[in-house]
């Protein structure tokens, strides 16, 4: 019996979207294990059968299975509760009416439409099979509505740099209170003198890792070491360099085939900005008072300061931070001020991408305007939003190209780092995240294990670097655009902020060269084998008892499978019959071999095999 309540589809969502200017992707959900197959009934509403399909109402001249096209859907994946089914279709006239015919193992038939789920007794001539009034509608594939992120992002491997901690290339501009490089663990107010020249000096190092994109946390003027308290969006912080240094950085990066992404903090501004200082001085009479969300004056209720109460602030601020008042992005003056900043760095410095801080707290009308303005200057600009939760609301093609995929981070850490997910739960979590978004969105998703906002992966893994290696391997074999946080390649550790912002170590004698070799090798594999970047992933073996798994990636005839043992004991996995006896290449260790019935992996071991053609 098919559970009707579990059946779900919605047009114009991750279940129904234009993949490109000619192709529709369609998904439907059913209860796990109940449905044997699903057939998509699809056709043009104006040409469903000979004589026309009755427009958007009914297929008056068609009956039953006549007319339209019938496409057998593939089972895309499964989660703990559901199965997901998928197919791609290319409507001849760029529009479609469609419904889904579900068949259970005991031959029960249901037609799932937009208004009703109807029991079908005969799949050949039941009138419901062409009652278009119950069919879902995709009215038209308008090219301008198609999600269209820059294609280069799919091939990009990012390296995140916290400028104040990467390298000190020009001590003459370091802050007065600068500490000797790496002389102590950082505190929230520590300065070590990292700057833009330091990055330029090490571009060859970054290139040698295989990196093709650098993401910088803010370099604009601010009082803190992190610069998320921006005081002037058009000025380089003097401790980082000047305009010429930044132009040199971008020119040299581009010469090496490295894209550059800057960080924009448009949700809030620093308390030392001229705008906020003017409000502090003139109160309600300030010409900038409407730039902010001020509840009342005075701005600070000093009677509540000692208790550190959030009620102390009489204005809205990021995370109740006194030094980060929230900007009113509905104010026309604020809108133009921020758009001018966005345009400035693209036009004058030729940056390739913007990462947008606290993007989910800024109104979406502003982001639509931001996208239109910036894409008009540089159509291939990558716009990345910081959103830590489900983000479909921002990924319809009119705001962001991608978000930072922290939900996938959580799943990876849950299995490989904290052991809070078992192998089956991990599979379900990854599958659920993948079907939450259109494939073309996932293809440019920003994949990360750690950042300046989180503990480093080494710490999350309890200092077990073998577990961290497994996490990196999984990250770099997923569709999207993976990012490595600076120092991760040499085993740099660090807990929560500020310890996750330690100085980069430049003494090679202190580098974990084994970890570095691992990172460079998986980057090389990702670049060499397109299947590792492709969205198509099939779970071949899930062994909960041994905490091990095998999954396969496919692309244009290329097949690669990855086996992982996330256990402190050796595992022995039974291979699917299709793999037994296959001649393969161990592409990680660069040697050929032939598979037997079982695959043995050491504790926290892995294998990456390409099936030989």
Image (tube, rainbow, N blue to C red):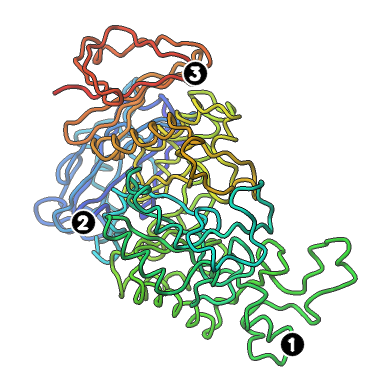
Q: Residue furthest top?
A: 597
Quadrant location, the C terminus: top left
- Residue at the disc numbered 3: 547
- Distance, label 3 to label 1, CA atoms, is 62 Å
Which of the 4 image quarters holds residue 8? top left
Q: Earlier in the sequence, mark 3 or mark 1?
A: 1
- Distance, label 2 to label 1, CA atoms, is 65 Å
Question: Disc 2 vs disc 1: Cβ atoms closer than 8 Å?
Answer: no
**Residue 413 versus residue 441 in the image, above or below:** above
Q: Residue furthest left?
A: 50
Residue 281 — which label?
Answer: 1
Near mark 1 (Cα within 10 A), the count class, few <14, some 14-19 or many ≥20, is: few
Q: Is residue 135 visible?
A: no
**Residue 233 versus residue 148 in the image, above or below:** below
Identified at 42% across, 74% down, the residue is 243
- Counting from the top left corner in percent of width and height, residue 3 is at 45, 31
Q: Which of labels 3 and 1 is toward the front?
A: 1
Near mark 3 (Cα within 10 A), the count class, few <14, some 14-19 or many ≥20, is: many
Question: Disc 3 vs disc 1: Cβ atoms closer than 8 Å?
Answer: no
Near mark 2 (Cα within 10 A), the count class, few <14, some 14-19 or many ≥20, is: many
Q: Earlier in the sequence, mark 3 or mark 2?
A: 2
- Residue at the disc numbered 2: 45
Helix, strand or loop at mark 1: helix
- Counting from the top left corner in percent of width and height, residue 389 is at 54, 50
- Counting from the top left corner in percent of width and height, residue 301 is at 84, 73
Quadrant location, the N terminus: top left
Helix, strand or loop at mark 3: loop
**Residue 267 versus residue 573 in the image, above or below:** below
- Counting from the top left corner in percent of width and height, residue 39 is at 26, 36
């Amino acid at each position: 019996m098919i559970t009707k309540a579990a059946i779900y589809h919605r047009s114009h969502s991750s279940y129904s979207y234009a993949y490109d200017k000619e192709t529709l992707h369609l998904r439907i959900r059913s209860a796990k294990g109940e449905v044997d197959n699903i057939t998509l009934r699809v056709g043009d509403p104006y040409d469903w059968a000979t004589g026309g399909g009755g427009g958007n109402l009914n297929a008056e001249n068609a009956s039953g299975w006549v007319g339209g096209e019938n496409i057998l859907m593939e089972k895309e994946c499964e989660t703990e509760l559901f199965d997901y089914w998928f197919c791609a279709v290319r409507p001849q006239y760029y529009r479609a009416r469609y419904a889904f015919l579900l068949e259970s193992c005991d031959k029960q038939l249901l037609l799932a439409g937009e208004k009703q789920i109807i029991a079908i007794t005969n799949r050949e001539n039941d009138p419901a099979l062409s009652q278009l009034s119950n069919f879902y509608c995709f009215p038209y594939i308008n090219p301008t509505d198609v999600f269209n992120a820059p294609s280069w992002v799919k091939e990009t491997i990012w390296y995140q740099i916290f400028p104040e901690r990467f390298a000190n290339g020009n001590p003459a501009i370091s802050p007065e209170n600068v500490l000797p490089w790496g002389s102590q663990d950082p505190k929230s107010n520590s300065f070590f003198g990292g700057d833009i020249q330091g990055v330029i000096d090490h571009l060859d190092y970054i290139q040698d890792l295989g990196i093709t994109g650098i993401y910088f946390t803010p370099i604009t003027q601010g009082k803190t070491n992190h610069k998320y308290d921006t005081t002037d969006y058009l000025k380089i912080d003097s401790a980082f360099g000047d305009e010429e240094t930044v132009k040199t950085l971008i020119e040299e990066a581009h010469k090496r085939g490295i894209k550059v992404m800057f960080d924009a903090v448009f949700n809030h501004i620093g308390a030392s900005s001229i705008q906020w200082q003017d409000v502090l001085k003139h109160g309600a009479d300030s010409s900038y008072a409407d730039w902010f969300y001020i509840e009342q004056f005075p701005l600070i209720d000093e009677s509540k300061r000692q208790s550190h109460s959030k009620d102390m602030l009489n204005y809205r601020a990021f995370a109740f931070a006194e030094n980060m008042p929230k900007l009113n992005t509905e104010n026309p003056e604020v809108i133009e001020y921020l758009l001018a900043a966005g345009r400035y760095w693209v036009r004058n410095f030729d940056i390739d991408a913007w990462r947008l801080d606290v993007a989910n707290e800024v109104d979406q009308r502003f982001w639509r305007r931001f996208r239109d303005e910036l894409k008009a200057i540089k159509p291939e600009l990558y716009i990345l939003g910081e959103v830590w939760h489900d983000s479909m609301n921002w990924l319809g093609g009119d705001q962001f190209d991608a978000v930072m995929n922290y939900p996938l981070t959580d799943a990876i850490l849950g299995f490989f780092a904290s052991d809070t997910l078992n192998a089956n739960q991990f599979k379900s979590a990854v599958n659920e995240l993948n079907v939450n978004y259109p494939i073309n969105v996932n293809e440019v998703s920003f994949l990360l294990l750690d950042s300046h906002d989180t503990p480093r992966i080494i710490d999350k893994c309890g200092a077990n670097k073998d577990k961290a290696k497994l996490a990196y391997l999984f990250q770099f074999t997923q569709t999207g655009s993976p990012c490595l946080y600076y120092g991760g390649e040499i085993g740099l550790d660090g807990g929560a902020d500020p310890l996750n912002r330690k100085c980069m170590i430049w003494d090679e004698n202190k580098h974990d060269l084994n970890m570095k070799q691992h990172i460079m090798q998986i980057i090389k594999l990702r670049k060499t084998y397109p299947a590792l970047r492709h969205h198509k992933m099939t779970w071949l073996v899930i062994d909960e008892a041994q905490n091990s798994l095998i999954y396969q990636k496919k692309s244009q005839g290329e097949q690669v499978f990855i086996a992982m043992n996330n256990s402190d004991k050796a595992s022995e996995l039974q291979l699917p019959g299709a793999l037994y006896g296959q001649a393969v290449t161990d592409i990680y260790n660069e040697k050929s071999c032939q598979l037997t019935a079982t695959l043995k992996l050491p504790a926290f071991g892995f294998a990456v095999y390409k099936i030989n053609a």
